[in-house]
Image (tube, rainbow, N blue to C red):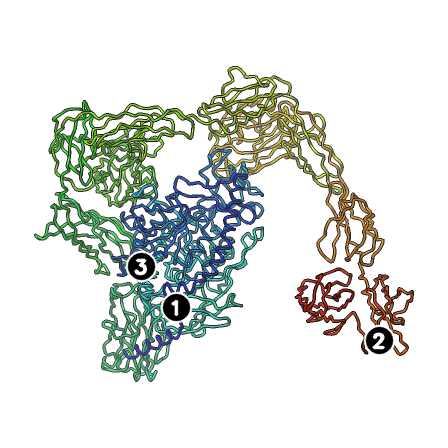
Amino acid sequence: MRNRMLSMAAVILCMTAAPVLAQKPNAKGQEQATNKAALQSIHNEIAPKAKSNKEHALQLARQKNWVVRHVEENGTVISLEGVDERGFPIHYITENNTRAAASVKTDQVWPGGGTGLNLSGSSDALRGKLGVWDGGAVRLSHQELLGRVTQRDGATAISDHAVHVSGTMIASGVNPLAKGMSFGARNLQAWDFSNDTPEMAAAAHELLISNHSYGTIAGWYYNTGRAGTATNPFWEFRANPNVSTTEDYNFGYYNSAAQLWDQIAYNAPYYLMVKSAGNNRNQTGPAVGQPYWKLNSTGAWVLEAQRQAGISSNNGYDIIATYGNAKNILTVGAVEPIANGYKTAADVKISSFSSWGPTDDGRIKPDIVGNGVGLLSSVGTADDAYSSMNGTSMSAPNVSGSLNLLQEHYHNKSGEFMRAATLKGLAIHTADEAGTTPGPDYVYGWGLLNIEKAARMISNSGNNLINERTLAQGETYTFNVTASGAGPLMVTISWTDVEGQVISVGPSALNNRSPRLVNDLDVRVSKGLTTYMPWVMDPANPALAASFGDNFRDNVEQVYIANAVPGENYTITIRHKGTLVNGPQAYSLLVSGIGGSAYCASSALSNADSKITQFTLGALSNTPAAGCSASADYTNLTANLEIGQTVPLSLTLGTCGADNNKVGKVYIDWNNDGDFEDEGELVATTGVVNNTQTYTSTVTVPTSVQEGNISRMRVVLVETTNPNDVSACGTYGKGETHDYRVRFLAASKDVGITAVMFPLQGFCANPAQNVEVVIRNFGTAAQSNIPVTVGISNSNGQVATLTGTYTATISSNSEARFFLPGTFNAAANTSYTFTAATALTNDQNAGNNRLVQVLSTSSPTDAPVASATVCGSGPTVLRASGNGTVFWYDAMTGGNLVTIGKEATLENATVNKTYYAALNDFSGTVPAASPTSGGAMSSFTNGRMYFDAEIPFILDKATINVGTGGTMTVDLLDKDLSGNVIASTVITVVPGVNEYILNLPIPTAGKNYTLMVSAFGGGATAYRNNTTNAAAYPFTIPNVVSFTGNNASTPTAFYYFLYNMKVKATGCASPRVAVTTTAAPATVAAITPAGPAEFCVGGSVVLNANTGSGLSYTWRKDGKMIENATAATYEATASGNYTVTVTAANGCPQTSQAVAVTVNPLPPTAVSISKNFGFGICPGQDFTLELRAETGGQSEGYTYQWTRNGAPIANAAGATYMASTSGNYTVSVTTPCGTTTATPVAVNNDVATVTAPAGEICGTSGSANLAAQTNAGKLYWFDAATEGTLLHIGETFATPVLTQNTTYYVAASNETVGNLGSKNHSVNGGHTSFTGGRMYFDAQVPFVLQKSTINVATAGTMTVVLLDKDLSNTVIASTTINVVPGVREYDLNLLVPAAGKNYGIQVSAFGGGATAYRNNTTNSAVYPYTLPGIASITGNNQTAPSSFYYFLYDWQVSAASCSTAPRVSVPVTLTPATVAGTLSTSAESVCYGSNGGTITLSGQTGSLVRWEASTAGASWTTVEGSATTLQFLNLTQTTSYRALVRNGGCSEVYTAAVTVTVNALPVAAISVSEANKFGFVTLTASPAGQGNKYLWSNGETKASISVRPGNHTYTVTVTDGNGCSATSAPAKAIPMPNAHSVHYALAGEQEMQDGLSLKAYPNPSAGRFTISFTAEETGKVSVRLVNAVGQVMLEDTQNSFSGHYEQQVNMANAPKGVYILQVSLQNRTITRKVVIQH
């Protein structure tokens, strides 16, 4: 063992060298690591935005008819929560817990679970750290949640969905089937999902986990709030047509909400958001051709008459919407429950609705799956209400509630919490494989959550590593591990990434593959020259299996080495790509399958002579190559051994030289501890062999080995005569050592008993008690014919032994329930020991064959306390109390059942009559149809029988007539025709008529429970009864149960499988007690209204019942009980007949006389009148027109009065009126509460008008889109002013391509719709794809063939063509339709353009295998088929026309009847394309300020639209001017001009631009010198420069002049080479007092003049500089900064200033160049050049 210990120490040293993340402590550490300031900033920023966005959405909802909030019947909540950046609506939608816990193995960490951890979520450290956002408030008083939930946001509208989700997370288990995952959790924090993101930001620092079982409605949505009619269908398509008309971009899209969730997670690194993936996969939209609603380009709903092919059906990949695609959350899909627990990937079945990934950028979503089908949990309708629901909304809390237990376990073990990335990584790392291929996928994500495995990883630090670290910029982290063989070697890194960038909504947002990952970390594992890469997926081929490569998309990476060699070293390396945003990146590292020890070495010192020539173990067989070796590594070869299996071993000892004595041994490390020294690990020893011999033996695999582990096997051959010289380690003289791998597999033949299912603990005394056990097939092969024995004993010894054989087949990893033949006598209040055992031949694991379970009978139920009272002259009231259901009989034993209930009423009034009451004392048989007559044996699994239960009871047994043996699964479905299975049993059946035990409990009274056989196994069949009228429903036991019918179309003709059903009461029976009736006076009941009983809506009246001692009250309206109305008064607000039942203390009831309450409706807030002329009414003719008063839906209680031209119309008092005379009509709607009158409408039958603007085609050819409007009738387009050809029907018409001016004509006409053609679409002639059958018809007028009925046999497409008149073969119209089997009507819309004879119509092609029925029965086609005045079908192209009719039955046609408006001409003009022309300018260059000129347009085709100008390269702006010549004046900047020209209605074209350059004015200044020796001073003008001209105020023209000193003032005008002039400021000829001249355009760092100093620094600068000067005298100071063209950039004037002046200037955005700084104090001015360089 010494070598092993040294190896382990080396591993430990290596492991501890890895530093642990510093920010990892408990709640205090969570607080330290959370960036509260950032979270508060997020909250402060988004809270007002979210509020404003929702308010905007609510405003738009009124305009665009969006749903604001809707709760569906199944509890789904839909809520409008905002609009996206394009103004489209964002709607949130909410998406048997014991099976859920078993599916993800949460039950294994509960008290009593296999891990022994006893977790429940009750730890004080977890209090208040679990949150939920959902579609409403949680029912805080529910018995499963009482005192354990805080509604943080004050929401009050209780949501079933929110209560169900919360229950799945934390329900305490009052109902054991509804027990929550964290059933002991305290202080669940709850919010309504409105305003969720700001609330999450505010609460993130408090929470560890929150659940979000809701999402964004995207793609198709079946809105049950709509009517479901052709004009208001259920289906809605929510794609934004501005992005795509066939797919909703929100699927896979990383939106701003996803970004915010990631940002919150990044700043709260311990907080994990668990989000449902969505239920989109079964929201597939209507069938092609059916109507639906869609959003138009403005976000308003519009009705689409027919769905077209090509629109996505939401039923494949990429259907997880918006924030379900966030990186840092855990997105959860839904699978079906795995009641028997996970064994293989095939056990995991995705639900029909769960949404699939990937994200648009290819990340793996969902992250994980949980159970989301049939979860029983609490609901909000009552404190003890439960319901089963399906959805990813259920799988998410299954996961979040379970993950809470992992945080509890981690904290219990370390005093710390895991980071969110660690928890997410742990869930992914330990997930069970799901799907058809290894690795992650876009359906199941990383697999099925396995809480047991995750908890064991936390517990077992020897073989696992959980480490929280940070990776610095440029860092590479490397460390070594040793494979242990305890499962595969797996390395997972997980990190909370910086939020990604959102792609703006638009076409580029659709399926954009650019990664959202910001910080890209990488993990690699290497061994020698081999590098193992992480899993990767290909989003372009989402169905492909995962492969290995560089993962640049996900913030979870995993390396998976399935066959790591135990004892070998592997190197793990973690690095990153690029630059890490926001500094070092925190990450979590999870490693399993490590902690192994290096195996000791074994080798010969010489490779001569003896060798192993062949070795086999089971299926492993190895024949080494010729030649000898001292040792050989064959760990690439694996022996697969089943647990408990006995396998053959063969070892051939030979030689490659001399034959010497030798001994061989075989070792297997069964317990994976890194050595071969433990008991039983030497599995074979040969005798002494001195030549080549083969040794054979067998090896039995211990049942203690761990399934899935990989270990080492060593074969050692030593030249010796003493077996003791051979050991697993060390060196030896000659011989050979081989090393192999062994993998331990589940046994193929392993069955056992897992439970005694019946009786239950506390069962009732029963002289014939049955026993049911659960047999589990733990093995990998199916098993049958399993002997079972159950011994029953008590303190007195053995009571009975029941034996039987389970003959049906149990598949691998499955269970079966087996009622053993026989019974035993169970006495009350006795403890029984049940010893159950299986005895399968050659069972590989005897350890699970036997189960001992102690169950006790209960004490007898106490008899009820009962009374019977005759109330006055009747009725008789029976009352009793006790635990259970009270049954009343007319005899002490046997007798007849009189009634049931703790309070019952009988109509008779006999005093001194005796009744007998007992608790739970009932059994009976439901009468049924005969099990032996009618119907054939069948395995039909959809035969549902419905029944009503008046009390809880147990469906104990049923007789079944079995045809062939096998198994039958009998399911009980919840009341109200629910699809949720609430109880189920699998029974083994044998041929013949026998009685079988069902033991199905009906939990409560209710209507429409369902009983059905849902599965037949092993080839089983049974007889149903389907003889006409054989099932005379109802089959009834009065007051108990009534079978009312079934789901067959003719219920009375069917009865399904379960005959002569025996039922019994729930609970143990008590003795019967005798109760004799006594007399009591009748109770008084009366109602006195406190006010008028007739009032308007919004009013009420208080109804007062008589009062007295001990009275109780029950109020009813129209005979129906009013919920919670049990006081002596009731406030009535609705119309109806009210009664009160007053019950005295003795139970005697009396019901009052009814009081009628009438609530009159208010008049409608508004009334409008709708009208429409019927088709076929021609202008000027007599008419009748229906006028309808539209009141918004309400009409009850309204009276109407119609008036014409202000006068009431006699007898016109209905909601509609048939007007036949022109005039102004109105209607008044009156109730006793007021009157509302509609705005008058005018009615006349004048000739209609048609307006149609002319069309225009730009260019020499093209098509025009023409449009027309009319105020009556439909619009018909023709090619002539009279007669001509009908071209189109509708408001718009697209012309063919025209090359010359053309005139079209449009008229308004009423429409005649009619039918013609054969209606005999029977199957005569068979279905065919014959394309040669042409039918002929005559057209009396142009018309449209709108629809036709087709009898389709097989689906596909059919192409229908219309051929021109006169038997022509020219196709003039065609359509291809998608057809489905059956008789249905299809849209054709084929236009017959003109009157004519012998048009043709035929099906020219069948596609996709389509066939349809023609009629070819002799003389079956009675031509002609005529619609008078429109068309006549005259025959076909067959030699016997009357024997054929082809495919298109019952034509529906539309034609114009009478003209409502004459034809108007619509000319289409071809207009030449626009030519922009050219621009010229009168001056290409001008001087700054005072200037002017013109821009002239010439050579254009068309008219000037507008002038535009642009200065200094800025955007173009419109300039006033409509003539072709534009004048400009006083430009101060260089300006470009262009003109926009359009010819007619054609496209607008810009001219090329012309530019007028504005030249800067020179900056003129004068410098004064000191007096020269002659007494003159020199005045010098600036700027100096070649080409400049000067003009002094004294007339001189030189740059410098000499003048006598004095108080004379001079100016100079400087004109530069561009002809631009400027005049200097005045200067006096006063000489300087010293030897230096002063230049007023300063260039030095500092100048001084008359007490004024000036600085500008730094100079040059990039635009930021400081102006500074000191003025010694007080006076007016002006500071100005001007550019080269004299534009003032900065100006500051102070009227009285002295002292120091300083100002910082920011001109960083100003153009580079030279600027002039001028500072003036009174009459003195000093200037400086300031240079800006960028």
Checking the image for residue 467, the label placed there is 1
The amino acid marked with disc number 2 is: Glu
Task: Using the image as rendered, state which of residue 1416 and residue 1362 is in the foreground.
Answer: 1362
| Distance from the alpha carbon under mark 2 to that under mark 3 | 95 Å
Farthest residue, direction front: 1674
* Label 3 residue SS: helix
Residue assigned mark 3: 124
- Name the quarter where the C terminus is drawn: bottom right
Camera-near label (2 vs 1) is 2
The amino acid marked with disc number 1 is: Asn
Whole-percent x, y for residue 981 in the image: 31, 43
Report the side of 899 relative to 1632 (left or right). left
Mark 1 residue crowding within 10 angstroms, few (<14) / some (14–19) / many (20+): some
Residue drawn at point x = 57 percent, y = 17 percent: 1207
Whole-percent x, y for residue 626 in the image: 37, 77
In the image, residue 1682 above or below residue 67: below
Tags 2 and 3 in contact by the CB under 8 Å rule?
no
Whole-percent x, y for residue 989 in the image: 24, 43
Whole-percent x, y for residue 931 in the image: 24, 34
- Residue 1444 makes an appearance in the image: no
Camera-near label (3 vs 1) is 3
Tags 2 and 1 in contact by the CB under 8 Å rule?
no
Checking the image for residue 1570, the label placed there is 2
| Distance from the alpha carbon under mark 3 to that under mark 1 | 25 Å
